[in-house]
Amino acid sequence: MSYRDNPQAIADLVRATEVHRDLFINEEVFQLEMEHLFANTWVYVGHASQVPNTGDFFTTTVGDQPVLMIRQADGEVKVLHNRCPHKGVMVVHGASGNAGRFLRCPYHAWNFKLDGSLLALPLKRGYDPERFAADEASHGMAPVENVKNYRDFVFVRLNPQGVSFEEFFGESLSTLDNMVDRSPEGKLEVTGGVLRYMHNCNWKMLVDNQSDTCHPMIAHESSAGTAVKVWEEAPPGTPKPMAVEQFAPFISAYEFFEGMGIRVWENGHGHTGVSNSIHAAYSDVPGYWEQMVQAYGEERAKEILGDVRHNTTYFPHIMVKGPIQTLRIFKPLAANKTLVESWTFRLVGAPDRLLERTLMYNRLINAPTSVVGHDDCEMYERAQQGLMSRGREWVNVARLYEPGEEERKNEITNGTNEWQMRNQYRAWSRYLTASMTTPQKQDKEFA
């Protein structure tokens, strides 16, 4: 079956309690995701602290579209399509750096202002002015028009029409608010570099996993479980290592995860850890509480630090851990290949011990050399292989399903409910087909 130009066929892949295996293995579905899903939704690009000075840039992708985030002379952060309008070469190739006063294409030296507009080109006399003014190239590098800088987190929507940033995220922005507010100065900085880890599986498997609370005590028994057993054999009075604090909750019983709770927001967003989480029992860091009380007052400080939500999924493809200050991006490369980027943040003004905890967590859980992360990776890759089987066509997400839940908004439910997974797949269907059924308007000048 062909899914192109067939939004009903796409919609039929998502049922109330099942999704079809083609969501994970079909290359045509993957290409439609790149063309429509990642263009219709608000997608995270980067953090403003990655481009602190005029001319600083950071390159990434939105779906399969190369873009760059760049700081302007007036302090604004803009996002440009990373493509020269001349021959199509990527103007900026490195991951990050400083462009100086202008951007320069490495192929023919066309120059662009930091906002992407055309500045100069060699041998300009070779172009008829009237003819060139009518050409698309005269407009320079294409800017991404829909950009939102929310508390230094920069998001874009590629399609010119669609849901607003505020409507798309709604109450889910409270996770970003909480992470920023954990700084006594209300400010975050990306630090510690980035850990990149290739997974031979579909990107949605990683998104699905973020609210899967029925796997940790099984999949992570051999890693986190072993670490805890080794610690239990330590001599009495041995200080509990930070690593054991981070490992131990992964093998908690089902009852623990049931009691954590899950909050399901609109548009595919949601988080585990409403009333408790694996991040709730870390040791106190000397001086931090006093800093927070001084900055916010005791009541507000308790409110901020008492919010220990676990994984917040921001649809379509990032996960944020506010209490441990990490953000993971699941970058789709093919139907069966995903690059995972794990970023860490420093709470500006907070004790360095908190950053040490953040960096250790990222290495232990999310790195290519991690302990816990490899358990999940093996399960994803086994699933990718298993879904090639023609023995069954559907993937089950029926746990604790309630008829009519599709119409309920911003609910709290049992921590092992698969409602958040169903929420994501419903959003997947809706936003993937949005521009298939309602074509986007084109620029009349170049239509």
Image: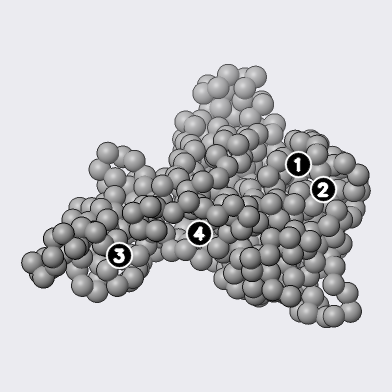
- The local crowd at label 3, few if under 14, some if 14 to 19, many if 20 or more residues have their Cα within 10 Å, is many
Marks 3/4: CA–CA distance:
19 Å
Q: Looking at the image, tell me whether mark 1 or mark 3 is earlier in sequence order.
A: 3
Q: Position of residue 317 (x, y in %)?
A: 62, 56
Residue depicted at 29% across the width and 45% down the height: 72
What residue sits right under mark 4 in the picture?
62
Residue 403 in the figure: left or right of residue 362 = right
Marks 2/1: CA–CA distance:
7 Å
Residue 85's disc is: 3
Residue depicted at 29% across the width and 50% down the height: 115
What residue sits right under mark 2 in the picture?
419
Give the structural element (helix, strand or loop) at label 1: strand
Q: Position of residue 246 (x, y in %)?
A: 70, 52
Q: Looking at the image, tell me whether mark 4 or mark 1 is earlier in sequence order.
A: 4
Residue depicted at 13% across the width and 60% down the height: 129
Marks 2/4: CA–CA distance:
27 Å
Marks 4 & 1, CB-CB < 8 Å contact: no
Residue depicted at 53% across the width and 27% down the height: 291
Marks 3 & 4, CB-CB < 8 Å contact: no
- Nearest to the observer: residue 343 or residue 251: 343
Marks 2 & 1, CB-CB < 8 Å contact: yes
Residue 362's disc is: none
Does 392 appear above or below 310? below
In the picture, the quarter occupied by the C terminus is bottom left
Marks 1/3: CA–CA distance:
43 Å
The colouring scheme, among rainbow, by chain, secondary structure or one colour, is one colour
Give the structural element (helix, strand or loop) at label 3: loop
Q: What residue type is labelled 4?
A: Val
Visible in this render: residue 277? no
